[in-house]
Image (cartoon, rainbow, N blue to C red):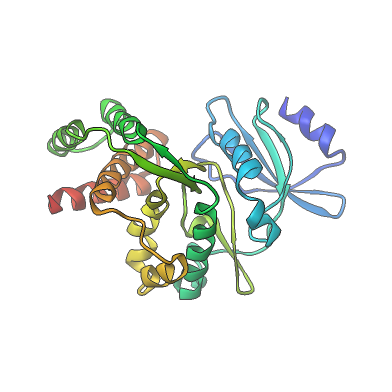
Amino acid sequence: MQRECLERWLPGLTIEADMSWGLVATTVLRARSGDRRLVIKAGGPSDHHIVREIRAHCRWTRPWVAEGRAARLLYADDSAKVLVTDYLPGELVEGSPVEARLDVYTQAGELLRHFHGQASLADADYEVRMNAKAEAWLDGAHRIDPEAHARLRAMVAQWGPVAVTCVPTHGDWQGRNWLWDDGVLRVIDFGRAAMRPAAEDLERLAVREFVKVPGAERAFFDGYGTDPRDPEAWWRQQVRAAIGTACWAYRVGDETFELEGHRMIADLLRDR
């Protein structure tokens, strides 16, 4: 079905490179149709990212697309789990010398502020759902230390419902999803985009770029304007994120990411 869609949309398509991460059931290809460079994303049977990415492009990316900061969606079929966008030029920020530039983080803050500002809604059950998801992770296969597991489970079990305000979030806001092109920051990969509390888009930055790049956090908030992290809500989110990181990474076999999750858990439990 995916091949049929591509043949219908893009006759004579040429595949140039496979850019997939190789950890989840999503294939990402750089391609060419005539003189136009494209990106194709196709999901497997268990993939949930493609539908979310299509939805994000239809609802939220238009302001970024208009400024050349995100790719334009050209074709999509959510039932076939396939989409095609324009190819964005630029150097991936993560792991490059650009990662140390503070203007990268200022632009990241500015872009995110505009993205978050597009819509908002009150959600009285959001944290209840997220707590249940964290408990489900703990119930499944993982390598979390038994003592840490017991502490985490007791912690999550005592959290009750808390009303929150949700906004459009990217869901994986960090250097591996940013491109730097001659002084301009661009954004890729909307496979985790959803309505969430704004602070959740700081989740990866807080344990990665803000830690290893001096001044990155200040530069980011210079662009964003305010810090959306309520201390208690942020604490709960960090705990849930640490659980999800350790458990998800174990299931897909990403040992480096799994170790990051275990470090997050150890740091959080040491603070309480």
At 23% from the left and 46% from the top, the residue drawn is 265
At 71% from the left and 36% from the top, the residue drawn is 76
Tell which of 113 and 50 is nearer to you.
113
Tell which of 163 and 247 is nearer to you.
163
Is residue 92 rendered to the left or right of residue 5? left
Residue 70 seen from this side: no
Residue 187 seen from this side: yes
Location of residue 207 with respect to 248 vertically, above or below: below
Q: Position of residue 32 (x, y in %)?
A: 79, 49
At 50% from the left and 52% from the top, the residue drawn is 116
Q: Quadrant of residue 206?
A: bottom left
Is residue 272 rendered to the left or right of residue 36? left
Q: Position of residue 208 (x, y in %)?
A: 36, 59
Q: Quadrant of the N terminus?
A: top right
The count of marks equals 0
Q: Quadrant of residue 114?
A: bottom right
At 30% from the left and 28% from the top, the residue drawn is 132
Q: Position of residue 75 (x, y in %)?
A: 75, 39
Tell which of 123 and 248 is nearer to you.
123
Q: Position of residue 14 (x, y in %)?
A: 80, 45
Location of residue 91 with respect to 258 vertically, above or below: below
